[in-house]
Amino acid sequence: MQSRPLHPWQQVTAGSGLMLHAPLTVRTDPAPLQREFAALDAATGDEGRMFMAGDGSWSSITLIEEGLGSDNLRATGRPTPALDMMPSARALLEGLGCRILSCYVHRQEPGGLLRWHYDGAGLHQPEARLIVPIIAPPAAVTWIGDSPAAYPAGTPWAGDFTFPHQVENAVDEQRIVLLVDVVSDDRARSLAPPELYGRLPLRSALAEQAINSLIANREPVPA
């Protein structure tokens, strides 16, 4: 991967030794997921998609709809009819053994870009996000801090998304992933190396520093 200058908020993690992403201990065959996604994609109209970007460069189809508990916190999600069209995804989700809050099959258009942002997902947080690449163009990459994540199709992975991150796709192929939000309990953490959620004081301090740097250096939105 071609090197490039780091933004100030990326420089925060450079040389820190923190693990910001890692593959999970499970693997899956992407071929059935690819076939099932193609059928679901063809059968789903615009009304069945949730567009994540104003320009339409991101869209998703809900496989497990997030639930809401009596305390107004997210609860175990509910399968949608779309999940019935992806039995391989269902088997994978059941095999994870995690408490799943939501799951989306996410499509990024060729050349799509989800610019630098941050959220509260991480295995050291109450909720974590697991990503399962279904179609993974070689040039597609997710930058988390100073660390590029580019896992092949069929290799689920997790990241510390409390750090600023940006998702870039190749110009000539769509990128398809499952986005799986889970409760960060012992089972979920057992799927990833402890280094991904350890060193909490340093991890929290650097995440706050990186976020502050992103906010301070973010270009203003044109009026």
Image: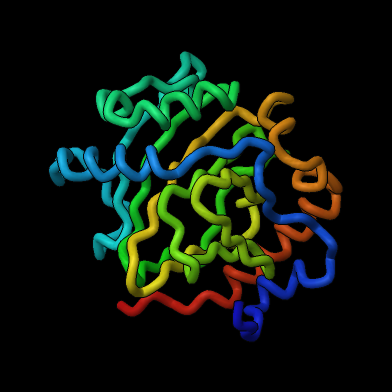
Q: Is residue 65 visible?
A: no
Q: Which residue is rendered at x = 53% and y = 38% of the image?
A: 28
On the image, which quarter does residue 185 sit in? top right
* Colour scheme of the rendered structure: rainbow
Q: Is residue 8 visible?
A: yes
Q: Is residue 202 above or below residue 186?
A: below
Q: Is residue 24 above or below residue 139?
A: above
The answer to which of 201 and 81 lies nearer the viewer is: 81
Quadrant of the image containing the C terminus: bottom left
Give how far across and how far down residue 12 sits, in percent. 75, 70
Quadrant of the image containing the N terminus: bottom right
Q: Which residue is rendered at x = 48% and y = 79% of the image?
A: 219
Q: Which residue is rendered at x = 33% and y = 31% of the image?
A: 86
Q: Is residue 189 left or right of 90 when viewed as pictured? A: right
Q: How many marks?
A: 0
Q: Which residue is rendered at x = 63% and y = 66% of the image?
A: 148
Q: Is residue 40 above or below residue 12?
A: above
Q: Is residue 23 left or right of 102 when viewed as pictured? A: right
Q: Is residue 173 left or right of 101 when viewed as pictured? A: left
The answer to which of 72 and 21 lies nearer the viewer is: 21
Give how far across and how far down residue 213 sits, in percent. 65, 71
Give how far across and how far down residue 38 sits, in percent. 26, 45
Give how far across and how far down residue 129 sits, in percent. 56, 41
Q: Is residue 86 above or below residue 8?
A: above
